[in-house]
Image (tube, helix red, strand yellow):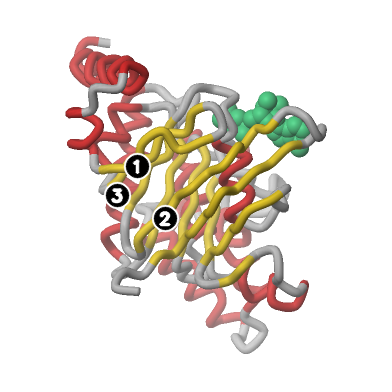
Amino acid sequence: MSEEYVVRLKDLKKTFDGKDFVLNGVDLEIPKGSLTVLIGFSGTGKSVLLKHMLGLLKPTSGLAEVLGQDLSKISSDDMISFRQKFGVLFQNAALFDDMTTIENVCFPIREHRRDLKNAQIIRLAETRLKLVGLDVKDYGKLPSQLSGGMRKRVGLARAIALDPELLLYDEPTTGLDPIMTEMVDNLILSTHKHREGLTSIIVTHDLYAAFRLGDYVAMLNQGKILLFGTPNDFMKSENELIRKFVNKGVKKGESTSDN
Ligand SMILES: Nc1ncnc2c1ncn2[C@@H]1O[C@H](COP(=O)(O)OP(=O)(O)O)[C@@H](O)[C@H]1O
Ligand SMILES: [Mg+2]
C-alpha cells in the first residue's frame, strides 16, 4: 500500500429498521494527514457515518476500518485505547456544565493518563487552552459564563487534550453567526496545521467552508459517496446535483461580506 489511509470504509451499509438503508454501500478512503469535509443534504446520514468511524454504531454489513483497526472486530479493552486516538467536537460542544474551563479539559486527561500527576495534567490542559486562544482569566469560569465562541474553544481544547491522530467535527459552526463561523473555521484550520500528520474530518452543510478548508471533499447522497475529490474536482464536476451544491456554496461565499 503506497498511501496510508486513516479511515477505510468498504461497501458499508446501515439500516436501523431492516428495510430502509441510511448507508447503502459507502466506499471512502481518507488519507492520513488530510483535512476532509463531508457534505450532503440534511438527513442523508452524515452523522450516522461519523458514528461508524467512532465505533459508536455497528455496520449492518461492510467494512469500517479506522486507524488500522477493523471496528467490527475490536474488543472492549482495545476500544478504550482506540478512543484515546481521536478527538470529537459536536455542534453543542457538550461541555460539563458544572465543571470549569480547565476542569473540562483535564477530564479526558485524568481518564486516560493515569501516569500523570495532577500538576502535569493541569499544565497539559493549559497548553491546549492556550493553543485554542483562551485567556487565563477564563480558565476558572463555568460554561454558562462563557460566550458561544469561547465554549467552542473549550470543546476543541478538550478534543485535542490527548493529542489525537484523528479529529472529527460534526457541524461545528451550525447555528453560529458569520463572524463566529469564520473564527471557528480558522481555529479548525490552525489546529489541523499545528499538528503534523493529524487527520481532520468535518461534517458541515457550509459549502463555502468546505471549499476553503478541505484538502478533500466527500459528498454523501442516497446512502453512497457521490464524489470524493479536491475542491477543484467539485468545481469541475458536471454532475447536476454537485453543480447545485457548488453554486449554492459559491453564492454564499460571495455574499458573506454583506450580511
Ligand atoms: N439511532 C438511530 N435510530 C434510527 N434511525 C436513526 C438513528 N440515527 C439516525 N437515524 C436516521 O438516519 C437518517 C440520517 O440521519 P443523520 O445521520 O443524523 O443525518 P445528517 O447528519 O446527514 O443530517 C435519518 O433519517 C435519521 O432519522
Ligand atoms: Mg448530522
Residue flagged by tag 3: what amino acid is it?
Leu
* Drawn side of residue 25 relative to residue 21, left or right: left
x%, y% of residue 172? 47, 38
Q: Residue at x 60, y 72 (%)?
A: 109
x%, y% of residue 18? 81, 35
**Label 3, residues with CA under 10 Å away: few <14, some 14-19, many ≥20:** some
Which residue lies under the disc numbered 2? Answer: 29
Viewer-closest of 126 and 112: 112
The secondary element bearing badge 2 is classed as: strand
With respect to residue 161, does 52 lie above or below? Answer: above
Which residue lies under the disc numbered 3? Answer: 189
* Drawn side of residue 93 relative to residue 186, left or right: right
| Label 1 CB sits under 8 Å from any ligand 1 atom | no
Residue flagged by tag 2: what amino acid is it?
Glu
Is there a contact, CB below 8 Å, between mark 2 and mark 3? no
Furthest residue toward right: 17
With respect to residue 153, does 1 lie above or below? Answer: below
Is there a contact, CB below 8 Å, between mark 1 and mark 2? yes
Give the Cα distance between marks 1 and 3. Answer: 20 Å
Furthest residue toward top: 258
Viewer-closest of 82 and 7: 7
Q: The N terminus appears in which quarter of the rendering? A: bottom left
